[in-house]
Image (cartoon, rainbow, N blue to C red):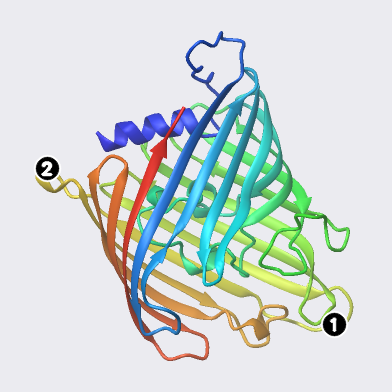
Amino acid sequence: MRRICLGVLVAIFSPASGSPAFGLAGQTPDDPSVRVMGFGDFNYRVSELDGPEGFRMGQMVGHVIADIDDRLTFFSEVSLTGKDTGYSVEVERAMVRYDFGDELKISVGRFHTPIGYWNAAFHHGSWLQTSVARPEMIKFGSRFVPTHFVGVIAEGRLPTSRLGLGYKVGIGNGRGANIARAGDAGDVNGRRAFVARVQSRPISIVGLEVGATFYSDRLLAPDGNEANERIYSLHAALERGAPEFIAEYAHVSHDPVTGSGDFPGSDAYYIQFGYRLSESYWSLKPYVRIEQVVVPAAAYVFGPLGLNYDGVVAGVRYDPGVYLALRLEYRYEQFEGLDPTHSVYAQASFVLAGS
């Protein structure tokens, strides 16, 4: 039942849906329709890491989708995140898309960068994903992989019958002066970023996706110089609930624009496995994830930032209803320069569907 309802939500609220929108009461088929959707979560944390423990407000997320006509769609995602001194409001995604057909759709705005799998499949709203939080390499605010992208993206399905090939190609502003943020107010150095992604969803294996991504940019290094950035990413995902398997790998290299030298690249990966139990225990989904970020000390740009990380995550997700998920999660983590730590997280996440 939950899988059917989730499929309906995705079909109605996803900005990537090419089907006509459901109109509101009293509308004619030619009138624009506006739909809303919300996500939220509340958490409890006990950890050996520095920082406050106890209850904490998670992230509240609102989606607005407007079908202006049968080809033109507007989508926005705004988050409200609790901080020590109040709340921060962020426009996470905002885009206008025009559908020429299944083979070509063009969007302009602020996106989640289509690098790898997780960042393109699971957006803000932890209810959407199995675990409490994202992997370290692609957590929001990550400095390893740019999670946001401002520009234009073309996407579509390639005319193949069995491989289910699709693509995304984009050009836009690279990372900002703070490399954890996108260039929302313009490109910091006048050199645009480029991203290209191709994936296959073969019809013979339901739920499987494999793909590769290439990303290039010229960014400002912490020492004030410019550096060429190249990111190569591979991913494979099988999402059936029983089982769920997601694996992703990314290699990032930086070379100074001026000067010389041979600088090593940085690598990161994660592997997550989950399995929704059968019959009377169907609402339970145990999961485990291993992940690692490896940054050589001599790496240009990343070397001084202390990004090395090793982590093991194990938990269980319980769905007492269609729109509510409860999680209990244990984490073993070692951040660069720190001793290994143990943490336990409890989370309640939910989704609100509107019209």
Res 143 → quadrant: bottom right
Is 249 in front, or is 319?
Answer: 319
Number of marks in picture: 2
Let me know if residue 203 appears in the view: no
Residue sitting at x 65%, y 69%:
252
Q: CA distance from mark 1 to mark 2?
A: 62 Å
Residue sitting at x 44%, y 31%:
354
Report whether 5 appears left or right of 33.
left
Q: Earlier in the sequence, mark 1 or mark 2?
A: 1
The residue that mark 2 highlights is: 279
Is 305 in front, or is 94?
Answer: 94
Q: Compared with residue 129, is residue 76 higher up or lower down, i.e. above or below?
A: above
In the rendered image, which quarter contains the N terminus?
top left
Secondary structure under tag 1 reads loop
Image coordinates for residue 88, horizontal then vertical, percent = 59, 60
In the image, farthest residue toward the front:
86
Foreground mark, 1 or 2, reads: 2
> Which of the numbered marks, if any, corresponds to residue 260?
1
Res 97 → quadrant: top right
Secondary structure under tag 2 reads helix
Image coordinates for residue 79, horizontal then vertical, percent = 55, 52
> For the residue marked with disc 1, what is the amino acid?
Ser
Report whether 54 appears left or right of 192.
left
Report whether 100 appears left or right of 290.
right
Is 245 in front, or is 96?
Answer: 96
Neighbourhood count class around disc 1 (C-alpha, 10 Å): few under 14, some 14–19, many 20 upward: few
> Which of the numbered marks, if any, corresponds to residue 173?
none
Is 250 in front, or is 31?
Answer: 31
> For the residue marked with disc 2, what is the amino acid?
Glu
Let me know if residue 218 appears in the view: yes
Image coordinates for residue 62, horizontal then vertical, percent = 52, 43
